[in-house]
């Protein structure tokens, strides 16, 4: 029975969602403020968090960052802010998905199932080795020749997604959809910037690639370095 924590200040919405999800077999807890939600995450870690952005005590994006500092629990942001820049910001801040208000309990449950599938697909104990690059999905660690790469959350997610498809060209739209949970087609710059940061930490550049090779007009692929 997956445990869901709803952090939402509007009592009617909070109680309705909790009731609908409980009917579907979820173990639901809720909080009416950001700090109360953070305390709940620490005291009794849920399987997934549904986080409203318009909270009365702390802005939702700050709550997201605070949760990310102590937990890797999947977070679905619930927001009435449907403009692209805000969605990109919350995804970059560590959200796994988002849902635009108003939404139905069916839509929210579908999002919950999706993030739980992604978490459950990670095989315990599995480490990906590509040349001198080592990636541990469970510990969320990545190292090169034994040196910790010190990746941000999104840098790690991007590297892991490419590593799981090593040798396969992955398009930027696919990366936006699967790593950033961003359905829009015009924000390729987000991918380019993160690829640039990732290359720097891998000791390479677009002009002199080692692991990350760009296929012009198609996408990028992670490969074993040429000897």
Image (spheres, helix red, strand yellow):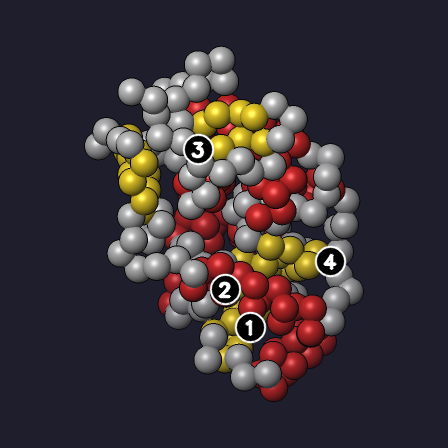
Q: In the rendered image, which quarter contains the C terminus?
A: top left
- Please, what secondary structure does the residue beneath circle 1 have? strand
**Disc 4 from disc 2: Cα separation:** 21 Å
- Where residue 92 sits in the image (x, y, percent)? 57, 41
- Please, what secondary structure does the residue beneath circle 4 have? strand
Q: State the residue position of label 1.
A: 30
**Disc 1 from disc 2: Cα separation:** 22 Å
**Disc 1 from disc 4: Cα separation:** 19 Å
- Please, what secondary structure does the residue beneath circle 3 have? strand
Q: State the residue position of label 4.
A: 100
Q: State the residue position of label 3.
A: 222
Rendered residue at 32%/44% (across/down): 128
The tag on residue 117 is 2
Rendered residue at 39%/62% (across/down): 42
Task: Report whether 87 appears left or right of 180.
Answer: right
Work out whether mark 2 precedes mark 3 in sequence or the reverse, and give the earlier one: 2
Rendered residue at 26%/31% (across/down): 132
Marks 4, 2: nearer the viewer: 2
Q: Is residue 150 above or below residue 177?
A: above
């Amino acid at each position: 029975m997956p445990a869901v924590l709803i952090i939402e200040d509007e009592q009617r919405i909070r109680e309705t969602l909790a009731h609908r999800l409980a009917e579907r077999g979820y173990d639901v807890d809720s909080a009416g403020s950001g700090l109360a939600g953070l305390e709940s995450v620490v005291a009794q870690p849920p399987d997934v968090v549904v986080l409203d952005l318009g909270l009365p005590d702390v802005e939702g994006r700050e709550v997201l960052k605070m949760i990310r500092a102590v937990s890797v629990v999947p977070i679905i942001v619930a927001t009435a802010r449907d403009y692209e820049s805000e969605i990109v910001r919350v995804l970059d801040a560590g959200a796994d998905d988002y849902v635009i208000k108003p939404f139905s309990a069916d839509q929210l449950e579908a999002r919950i199932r999706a993030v739980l599938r992604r978490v459950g697909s990670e095989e315990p104990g599995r480490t990906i080795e590509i040349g001198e690059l080592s990636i541990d999905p469970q510990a969320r660690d990545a190292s090169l020749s034994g040196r910790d790469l010190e990746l941000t959350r999104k840098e790690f997610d991007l590297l892991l997604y490419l590593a799981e498809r090593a040798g396969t060209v992955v398009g930027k739209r696919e990366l936006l959809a699967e790593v950033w949970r961003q359905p829009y087609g015009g924000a390729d710059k987000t991918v380019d910037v993160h690829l640039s940061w990732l290359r720097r930490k891998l000791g390479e550049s677009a002009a002199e690639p080692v692991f990350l090779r760009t296929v012009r007009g198609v996408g990028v692929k992670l490969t074993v370095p040429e000897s």
